Image (cartoon, rainbow, N blue to C red):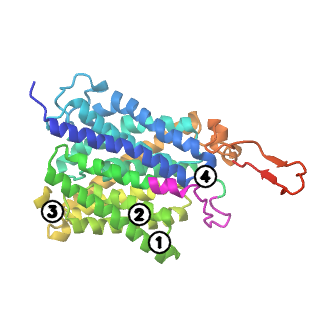
Amino acid sequence: MEAINQLDTMWVIIGGALVFFMNAGFALVESGLCRSKNAVNILTKNLIVFGLAVVGFWSIGYAFMFGGSGSFMGTTGFFLSGLDPLTGGEGHKLPLNGFFFFQLCFAATAATIVSGAVAERIKIQSFMVFSVVLTAVVYPIVGHWIWGGGWLAKKGFADFAGSTVVHSVGGWAALVGAAMLGPRIGKYSKDGKVQPIAGHNMAMVTLGGLILMLGWFGFNGGSTLTADGMAISHIVTTTTLGGAIGMVAAALWAWLRMGKPDLTLIVNGMLAGLVGVTAGCAFIEPYSAAIIGAVAAVLAIEAVIFFDKLKIDDPVGATSVHLAGGIFGTLAVGLFGRKSMGMANEGLLFGGGGTQLWIQLQGVAATGALVIVASLVTWFAIKKTMGLRVTAEEESIGLDASEMGLEAYPADRPSLSVATETPAKGTAAVAITSDATT
């Protein structure tokens, strides 16, 4: 057996571990942006979705994504059986199992995106079934088109680390799910005005956002699949600029549009900037990454406003961040990509014409069409068999009580009111009242 490259293997596994840790970031952001009465439910979904992704991607998904070079999907390697142990990484000398682990963490991320958009009113078992379908079938087919030698790869479509493969796939699926579920009770008034439903813990949101940015260095940097110091350093720089400029642009844009630098929009602006540079992080100049990050952040904020006008309720803004940011980031490769950095065609803004931009647009459209249709069919089938949404009563009392039977913030003790006995002469009277709340 030909020797593997040990440094490449270690870097890919470290990158995969960082992507895995993004599950913690998603859990904190999503639960913090929702109400405390649904925190356990959301945390459970963000935890179990990784296990469900393992089931779907290990059994079927990896074979569909990397099992052969057909134009539409792979057909070999179910349960990783019958594959060369050194075929991991599209020709790189990586162990199959190491490459599988890295790609598995990406698949789980796509499913986690959906969790936030359908939060606070979906039945947990319905979300679980959809997650398996997404990671076993829908995500891998798109992944095969782009990363597995499929028809978009043959056209020259460029998506280095997943603005389309991961983020747009998750974003399209989330959009369909949120639309089919309908808004949360009280989100929109009878005359159509938005009635904000505040999240319960901004510290969790902020910490979760920072964890996600940390994980993004493995998400984008690990996609080199080699321990190439120059390439990784460049990618880490463009990733940092995308996220950092995204958060600054979001703060300024929110200030301009709403009069205040909203923390939740700053966090989502940072994430949108990261999503935006993900497709082209290896192919763009650092200053291009800054521009992409800023534009993606502004687009994400405007997408929140747009979806509210359509009465599509996304409690955490996942659709705005991952779909709007993913589409723009994918198209931005056709604008800012450089041949000197590995692109087949120079970007439009560097004199390359519209060739690459047209290829990118085809990929965006094809991915959207597939995921929308597949999500509609899957969500509809689940609705007819299991049901999608909890009852109004269950939603009102909270999914922690109605579905989970466990509270995130239980009272430490029952409500009590205790007054001391009449104090001795010369001492102060003390009254103690404690009203424990959930």
x and y percent of residue 368 in the render? 37, 51
Task: Say which of 56 and 54 sits in front.
Answer: 54
The alpha-carbon separation of the residues under discs 1 and 4 comes to 23 Å
Q: How far, Cα to Cα, is label 1 from label 3? A: 32 Å
Q: Does the CB distance between marks 4 and 2 fall below 8 Å?
A: no
- The magenta span reads 187-207
Circle 1 residue? 254
Dot 4 or dot 3, earlier in sequence = 4
**Is residue 333 inside the magenta stretch?**
no
- SS label for mark 4: loop
According to the picture, the residue beneath numbered tag 3 turns out to be 338
Q: Residue 309: image x %, image y %?
A: 54, 65
Mark 1 neighbour class, 10 Å CA radius: few under 14, some 14 to 19, many 20 or more: many
Name the element at disc 1. helix
Which label was assigned to residue 269?
A: 2
Q: Earlier in the sequence, mark 1 or mark 3?
A: 1
